[in-house]
């Protein structure tokens, strides 16, 4: 049987996502910069595990010009992105992060990572002592509408490889169960301001705006359309 993770090695993920979602990178970099600034964190080193094309790190350089940047990813198809001129001041490495020698970083980024992993619990537990702060971006695929329709969850499973699905509370509980203290979390407004929104997402904007205004948590649990950015630290 073909392993779930093989899509990131054999080129099938790249075939489905030829741009590796790099158009979202400026938006994600702004999320990172905002939550770090809000918490007065000025890192000297930023590492992204599951860095993909590396464009988030490229965009973060303007916000943290004195920081050193490092990117790790398991996919061997990413080298042509990393060889672009604007990526050359970033240290990239292809392979399993835990098999490589590396320093302890000020901030470690996990942007759209844990929902792809066969065992996110073991992965998160192995990350203790690799950074002072951990910053995650987590899609909230699990909501009443997606469960009723079924198709949205199956689409993110087949196209972008999500195999775990979260609500806000499930995501935060997962971090707590794995030994992390959540310093701050916030919704990103993805359905309203993320790039590359589909026509269906744009049409669903106004029902979401109305329900979000009444009760944001309830609206997200019912209609979805949100992602979560979380700043955490290890308690171990």
Image (tube, rainbow, N blue to C red):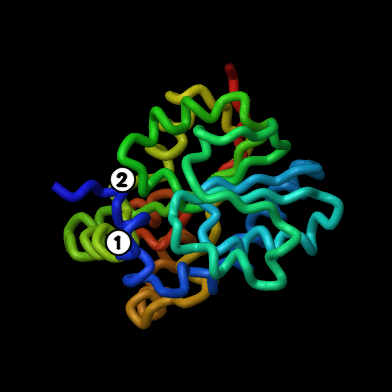
Residue at 38%, 74% in the rendered image? 201
28 w.r.t. 72: above or below: below
Residue 198 percent across, percent down from the top left = 38, 78
In the image, which disc is placed on residue 229? none
Q: Secondary structure at mark 2?
A: loop
Up-down: is 128 above or below 30? above
Q: Residues within 10 Å of mark 1 (few under 14, many from 20)?
A: some
Position of residue 89 relative to residue 207, above or below, is above
Q: Which residue is mark 2?
A: 164
The percent coordinates of residue 112 (x first, y second) are: 46, 53
- Disc 1 target residue: 156
Judge from the rendering whether residue 170 lies leftward or rightward of residue 150; answer left or right.
Answer: right
For marks 1 and 2 on the same chain, the one whose residue lies earlier in the sequence: 1
Coordinates of residue 168 in the picture (x, y in percent): 43, 44
Q: Quadrant of residue 76?
A: bottom left
Q: How many marks?
A: 2
- Left or right of 157, for residue 71: right
Looking at the picture, tell me which residue is in the foreground, 3 or 195: 3
Q: Residue 43 is drawn in which quadrant?
A: top right
* Quadrant location, the C terminus: top right
């Amino acid at each position: 049987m073909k392993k779930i993770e093989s899509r990131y090695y054999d080129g099938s993920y790249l075939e489905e996502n030829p741009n590796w979602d790099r158009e979202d990178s400026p938006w994600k970099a702004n999320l990172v910069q905002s939550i770090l600034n809000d918490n007065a964190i000025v890192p000297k080193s930023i590492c992204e595990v599951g860095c993909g094309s590396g464009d988030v790190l490229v965009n973060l350089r303007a916000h943290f010009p004195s920081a050193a940047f490092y990117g790790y990813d398991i996919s061997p198809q990413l080298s042509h992105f990393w060889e672009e001129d604007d990526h050359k001041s970033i240290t990239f490495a292809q392979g399993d992060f835990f098999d490589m020698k590396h320093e302890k970083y000020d901030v470690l980024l996990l942007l759209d990572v844990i929902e792809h992993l066969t065992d996110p619990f073991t992965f998160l537990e192995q990350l203790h002592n690799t950074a002072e702060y951990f910053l995650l971006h987590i899609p909230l695929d699990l909501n009443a509408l997606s469960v009723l329709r079924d198709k949205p969850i199956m689409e993110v499973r087949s196209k972008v490889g999500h195999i775990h699905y979260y609500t806000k509370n499930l995501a935060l509980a997962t971090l707590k169960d794995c030994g992390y203290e959540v310093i701050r979390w916030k919704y990103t407004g993805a359905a309203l301001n993320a790039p590359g929104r589909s026509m269906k997402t744009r049409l669903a904007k106004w029902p979401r705006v109305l329900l979000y205004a009444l009760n944001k948590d309830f609206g997200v649990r019912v209609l979805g359309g949100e992602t979560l950015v979380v700043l955490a630290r290890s308690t171990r």
